[in-house]
């Protein structure tokens, strides 16, 4: 297929890691002569980067593909991402899909389109190399991939089968990429990965050494954030470093998954709830204004009613700012399917709704703490209101003012400008 002048649209589903990878695929196609479609309807090629973390994510992927196939019957649809790796045959069967590229081939979109091949078979080999990726150019904040894959194999999770073993860039590679992103005007870089705290384990480098190198690097971004880090990998040294850092924001996102030690053991998690609580307390001791988010799974196998209530009470007592709640999703090939006591789908939803209501209470309480304070806000480019985030991740909206775009400005916070 001749790519010169072809118009391409990009759709990203799922995590921040997917956003960084979609941006990298887009740049490769643009370098090959394609144009990024201004409107989806103009596209002759559509690249859809999919997620497979839950059955709902897969359902959304299928719906998106079918919608595009109906709307643009002449377009070549290219499906990449975790869903493509795990369920390639399923995606091949959807009418209108031209290419399904797994983890080992997603960055070879240019070559595969030029070869004009047909869709690939399911589950091609997983890569053992690190493919760099980053996003910039379309927003004030950029996502920089520093690590990929996971060796943890939690009982409920299919991601190791979709992304392979843990591997990462070198510190020097990350610094080079960060300079490039910052050089394009991006003020804030979010470090992303499947298991970011596992950075450098193969090379002998450490995640803490990476953070220190980014903090002292000349020509880097003004702000950095860590997208997520396992609580057992969030060391006292990392917390203390962020507290003293010039550039790393007071913001942590920690996957908890359950507040019941019995459920955590069934999940194969590498910590107990007391360790999680100790990490939260340490963060707030060193960074009292820090935003702490936590992932929680509702209705996992083995989560009896008693264990859920125990988990809920524990989470209610945690000083976290927000919960990212996932109803448990059965994933083919995972060890969780061997665990007795499956929670009915309706009960999973009820538990998720209770946790979401608790999250609403926590975020409201967190925001109220800062009413009347003045904090630095990085404003994003927007056609409507001027929106941005404080250093500690409070979302702020002001009347439209183009002069604020991509600037860090002190803002006095009140109930009218903080967006829940």
Image (tube, rainbow, N blue to C red):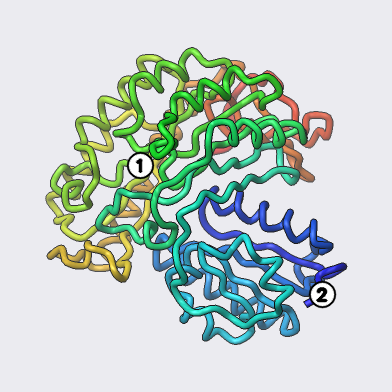
Left or right for 255, reference 122? left
* Vertical side of 64 occupied by 187: above or below: above
Residue located at (57% from left, 66% from top): 80
Nearer to us in this view, 22 or 61? 22
Q: Which residue is mark 2?
A: 2
41 w.r.t. 209: above or below: below
Is residue 416 at least partly visible in the picture? no
Q: Is residue 194 left or right of residue 99?
A: left
Can residue 315 be seen in the rendering of this structure? yes
Distance of label 2 from label 1 (alpha carbons):
45 Å
The x and y percentages for residue 279 are 30, 26
**In the drawing, does residue 103 fall left or right of residue 48?**
left
Asked which quadrant contains residue 338, the reply is bottom left
The residue shown at (12%, 65%) is 340
Element on which disc 1 rests: strand
Q: Position of residue 319 (x, y in %)?
A: 33, 28
Q: Nearer the viewer, residue 199 or 344?
A: 199
> Which residue lies under the disc numbered 1?
255
- Number of labels in the image equals 2
Sooner in the amino-acid sequence: mark 2 or mark 1: 2
Mark 2, secondary structure of its residue:
loop
Q: Do labels 2 and 1 touch, CB within 8 Å?
A: no
Looking at the image, is 43 positioned above or below residue 408?
Answer: below
User: What residue sits 37% from the left and 46% below the top?
Assistant: 357
Residue 23: x %, y % from top left: 67, 52
> In the rendering, at what x and y percent does residue 327 appear?
34, 58
Which residue corresponds to the image point at 44% horizontal and 46% vertical from the top-left? 167
Single out the residue that lies furthest toward the right: 5
Give residue 72's mark: none
Of badges 2 and 1, nearer the viewer stands 2
């Amino acid at each position: 297929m001749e790519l010169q002048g072809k118009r391409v649209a990009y759709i990203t589903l799922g995590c921040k890691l997917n956003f960084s990878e979609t941006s990298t695929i887009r740049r490769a196609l643009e370098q090959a002569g394609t144009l990024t479609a201004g409107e989806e309807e103009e596209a002759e090629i559509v690249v859809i980067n999919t997620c497979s973390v839950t059955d709902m994510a897969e359902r959304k992927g299928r719906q998106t593909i079918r919608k595009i196939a109906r709307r643009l019957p002449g377009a070549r649809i290219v499906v990449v991402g975790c869903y493509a790796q795990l369920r390639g045959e399923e995606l091949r069967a959807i009418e209108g899909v031209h290419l399904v590229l797994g983890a080992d081939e997603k960055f070879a979109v240019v070559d595969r389109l030029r070869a004009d091949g047909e869709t690939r078979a399911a589950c091609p080999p997983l890569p053992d190399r690190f493919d760099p990726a980053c996003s910039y150019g379309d927003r004030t904040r950029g996502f920089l991939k520093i690590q990929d894959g996971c060796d943890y194999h939690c009982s409920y999770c299919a991601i190791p089968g979709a992304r392979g073993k843990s591997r990462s860039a070198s510190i020097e590679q990350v610094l080079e990429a960060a300079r490039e992103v910052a050089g394009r005007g991006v003020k804030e870089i979010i470090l992303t990965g499947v298991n970011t705290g596992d950075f450098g384990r193969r090379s002998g480098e450490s995640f803490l050494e990476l953070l220190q190198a980014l903090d002292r690097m000349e020509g880097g971004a003004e702000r950095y954030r860590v997208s997520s880090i396992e609580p057992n990998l969030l060391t006292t040294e990392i917390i203390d470093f962020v507290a003293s850092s010039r550039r790393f924001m007071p913001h942590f996102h920690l996957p908890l998954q359950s507040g019941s030690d019995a459920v955590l053991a069934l999940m194969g998690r590498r910590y107990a709830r007391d360790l999680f609580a100790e990490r939260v307390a340490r963060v707030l001791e060193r960074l009292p204004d820090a935003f702490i988010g936590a992932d929680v799974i509702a209705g996992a196998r083995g989560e009896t009613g008693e264990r859920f209530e125990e988990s809920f009470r524990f989470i209610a007592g945690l000083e976290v700012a927000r919960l990212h709640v996932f109803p448990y999703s059965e994933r083919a090939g995972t060890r969780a399917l061997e665990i007795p006591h499956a929670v009915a789908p309706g009960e999973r939803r009820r538990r998720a709704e209770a946790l979401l209501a608790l999250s609403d209470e926590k975020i409201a309480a967190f925001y109220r703490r800062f009413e009347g304070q003045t904090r630095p806000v990085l404003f994003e480019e927007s056609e409507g209101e001027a929106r941005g985030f404080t250093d500690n991740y409070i979302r702020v909206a002001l009347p439209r003012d183009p002069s604020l775009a991509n600037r860090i400005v002190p803002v006095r916070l009140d109930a009218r400008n903080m967006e829940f």
